[in-house]
Amino acid sequence: MFSSGMTKNEIADVLSDIGTLLELKGENPFKVRAYQAGARTLEAIEEAELARLIEKGELQTMKGIGEALGLKIAELHRTGRLEFFEKLKASVEPGLVEMLQIPGLGPKKIRALRDKLWIVDIAGLTQACLDGRVAELDGFGAKTQEKILAGIRNREAYGRRHLWWDAAEVAAGIVAGLRRLQQVQRVEAAGSLRRGMETVGDLDFIVAASEVGPVVEWFVSMPGVNEVTARGETKASVRFDSGLQADLRLVPSDQFVFALHHFTGSKDHNVQMRQRALARGLSLSEWGLFPADEKHGPSEGQRGSGERMTEDGGQRAEDTGLRADDGGLRTEGGGQSAGGGQRPVLVQTEAELFAKLGLHYIPPELREGLGEIEAAEKGELPRLVEHADLRGAFHNHTTASDGRNTLAEMAAAADALGWEYLGIADHSKTSVVANGLNEERLLRQVAEIRALNASKRFKAHLFAGVECDILPDGTLDFDEPLLRQLDYIVASVHSLFSQDEATMTKRIIRAIEHPCTVMLGHVTGRLLLRREAYRVDVAKVIDAALANGVIIEINAHPNRLDLDWRHWRKAAERGLLCSINPDAHDTSGLGHVRAGINVARKGWLRREQILNTWPLAQVGEWMQARA
Ligand code: DGT
Ligand code: CA
Ligand code: CA
Ligand code: ZN
């Protein structure tokens, strides 16, 4: 990223980071609050308004922004950098900032730990908890100490994996960098990332190159590389500062497709593919497709230091679970026949590789060993939904509740995406921390939306909705007469996550049965790598949604991806309608639909099964029919 200035939301993030850092340093609370208030003020105005105020030198006319803060905002807006912020960051131990990720630890407590116990990182904190020293501190106690320890353990358990979204961003940069190298002929990211898994353990790259040395050299010298854990002729592995690891595998170009397929996985899919090959008298591996009676391994000179492929290869007989009697000679449906030519099968694309085994092309998202090979044999794979199929998105927030862009900015962003419609759904009154709307404010927003639609200022049609809290007893946060004035309602649980499974399930089903509920928001409430789902019987919830014609969303926020892809295939076959909802809290959040597309594809969903691929008129008719 070489863009120089910052957007207002990026500036707001810097201001609240400054507030946090100052708090960690024990600075004057008024100063701390000034930055936090400045951040909130910025969040609530329009991007264009900020630019205008800066240009006119009128920033200070805004509530809570004094001269000093105004200068800092202007500098960030212009240059994207702030000397004061850089110095401040350097003056605070990084371990303290990291400690903020532990639930229950705010800046005040962290400062107390540092000042009284000299704790400056998580390792020190763990030890102090184990020694019982934290419990003895004023304002902590045994319960807090226990909670901190549990938080640290959770963090360790989750710390090994990464959100798909974050991993994809890093991977895109690496693929682009590799593509620019003149020695590189082909490059592709493989592994769980390519399969669109919700979290990713490590990145896997497959490269075919005319010369290996410079490619490996580039890979191990990437910015942010913290440690080179393997470096050879055919493989290199690195770990970044973020903890994310990446494997690079270098293969001759005639092996590229086989390596790409193998390292895309999943393991279950690979095992089944090998069994299929063997049943046809062929042997499939990362090195190629050969007549099964020959032994094949990496060619001479391919075994570098740190090489693990051979170990992999050694496990293959076990993987296949092949018994002597199914090494049959069924070779119909394409492919090289057994025993015939001694030469490997050559393919240029994965589609050709599948074809050699009598299969239609299987998209990476489906390669989980869950019946995709049988479906590909029969030509029964679905035509999976694609990002370009989306014509709009529901469940989006604005500055009216806890969003960071105004209604008009969100509408303009929908226009920029070429969408036909955008559904607004701000929080309802009970979500106080999210600045939920009461009846009066909600009705004002509805009027604003109707007026915007009438004005034709934006191409995208705006749907007026609400993300309505499901109260602990399953009733909705607003009365029916009010809900009837909206175009659609997303019903979501935002409180009392601790209910037992039966109570939570009953609660959600009651909300589904409300005549005004159109969609169910983030069904399980999970936050990937951070918070477990609440206890709920998803199968019963799906039954109820089907019975009541309610949509279940795929919440596309990279942290949620809820309802999980593992439920979708069966549910959609039974007729459940889906909506890929970004739950955007700013204009850039609309882009998260891409992560939702992964979930839909992994759930075998076709375009028709997703509301926001439908043309505007069809959506409108559907809503009318439901009302
Ligand atoms: P991750 O990194 O944990 O999110 O998941 P993957 O799927 O990226 O796994 P990874 O990085 O360990 O390996 C990449 C692919 O390589 C994997 O999906 C399938 C293949 N693979 C790795 N180890 C084995 C193995 O022991 N047997 C078989 N059949 N395939 C393997
Ligand atoms: Ca991987
Ligand atoms: Ca790997
Ligand atoms: Zn929500």
Image: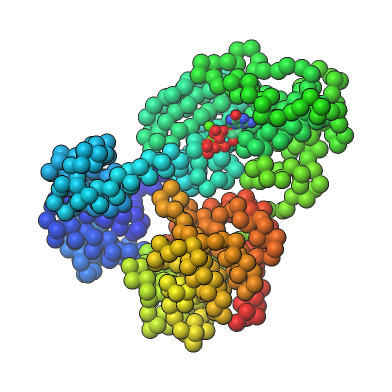
- Does residue 420 sit above or below 25 in this rendering? below
Quarter containing the C terminus? bottom right
Quarter containing the N terminus? top left
Which of the 4 quarters of the picture holds residue 55? bottom left
Q: Of all residues shown, which one is farthest toward the bottom?
A: 481
Which of these two is toward me, 607 or 421? Answer: 607
Compared across the picture, whether 427 is left or right of 41 comes to: right
- Counting from the top left corner in percent of width and height, residue 209 is at 59, 24
Compared across the picture, whether 384 is left or right of 32 comes to: right
- Counting from the top left corner in percent of width and height, residue 85 is at 23, 47
- The answer to whether one can see residue 223 in this image is no
Q: State the residue at coordinates (20%, 66%).
A: 64
Q: How many marks?
A: 0
Q: State the residue at coordinates (66%, 29%).
A: 319
- Counting from the top left corner in percent of width and height, residue 457 is at 49, 75
Compared across the picture, whether 557 is left or right of 33 comes to: right
Picture colour scheme: rainbow
- Counting from the top left corner in percent of width and height, residue 31 is at 15, 58
Q: Of all residues shown, which one is farthest toward the top?
A: 300
Q: State the residue at coordinates (72%, 53%).
A: 383
Which of these two is toward me, 592 or 316? Answer: 316
- Does residue 616 sit above or below 344 in this rendering? below
- The answer to whether one can see residue 472 in this image is yes
Q: State the residue at coordinates (50%, 24%).
A: 236
